[in-house]
């Protein structure tokens, strides 16, 4: 069975993005439904898959990474409003039997993602 995982790397400091809040939403048309909120661990990962088993279904989802709050907690001085604050990644799951890994590489000034393995 498939699963959804994530990983956050702080590219500004060259370390895992630990204690970073992540919200997972299911998307249905214009509606968003919060599924769960987690904090990343010391390795910048979640302790368990965000979705797996019967909860892992095809459809459209959104991960919201609270990157601005993470950098503020680290003492990074950035102007207000923050250039990178909440990083919203909307993606689709087409195959409920696959592993979808959605990593985030983030700094106060940029971010990138890809479908990992």
Image: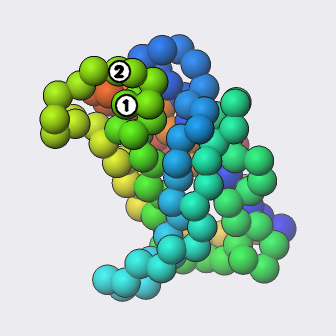
Q: In this view, does 53 lie above or below 73?
A: below
Q: Which residue is drawn at 44% across and 31% down?
A: 73
Tell which residue pokes out farthest to the left in this image. 80
Helix, strand or loop under label 2: loop
Q: In this view, does 12 lie above or below 107?
A: above
Helix, strand or loop under label 1: helix
Q: Position of residue 55 (x, y in %)?
A: 72, 77
Image-based side of 26 in relation to 83, left or right: right
Q: Which residue has dot 1 on it?
A: 72
Q: Quadrant of the C terminus?
A: top right
Residue 97 visible within the image: yes
Pointer 1 local density, CA inside 10 Å: few below 14, some 14–19, many at least 20: some
Marking on residue 76? 2
Q: Is residue 12 above or below residue 32?
A: above
Residue 116 visible within the image: no
Residues at marks 1 and 2 touching, judged by CB atoms closer than 8 Å: yes
Q: Which residue is drawn at 17% across and 28% down?
A: 79
Pointer 2 local density, CA inside 10 Å: few below 14, some 14–19, many at least 20: few
Q: Position of residue 115 (x, y in %)?
A: 56, 46
Q: Where is residue 98 in the image (x, y as percent from the top left)?
A: 73, 61
Which is nearer the eye, 25 or 37? 37
Q: Residue at x 78, y 79 (%)?
A: 54
What whole-number distance in Å separates the C-alpha atoms at marks 1 and 2?
5 Å
Which is nearer the eye, 39 or 3? 39
Q: Residue at x 31, y 83 (%)?
A: 30
């Amino acid at each position: 069975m498939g699963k959804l995982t994530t990983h956050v790397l702080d590219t500004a400091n060259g370390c895992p993005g630990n204690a970073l809040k992540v919200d997972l939403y299911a998307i249905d048309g214009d509606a968003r439904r919060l599924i769960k909120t987690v904090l990343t661990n010391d390795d910048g990962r979640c302790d368990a898959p965000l979705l797996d088993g019967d909860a892992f279904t095809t459809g459209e989802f959104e991960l919201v990474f609270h990157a601005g709050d993470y950098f503020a907690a680290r003492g990074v001085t950035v102007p207000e409003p923050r250039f990178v604050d909440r990083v919203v990644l909307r993606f689709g799951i087409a195959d409920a039997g696959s592993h979808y890994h959605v990593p985030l590489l983030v700094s106060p000034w940029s971010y990138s993602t890809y479908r990992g393995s």
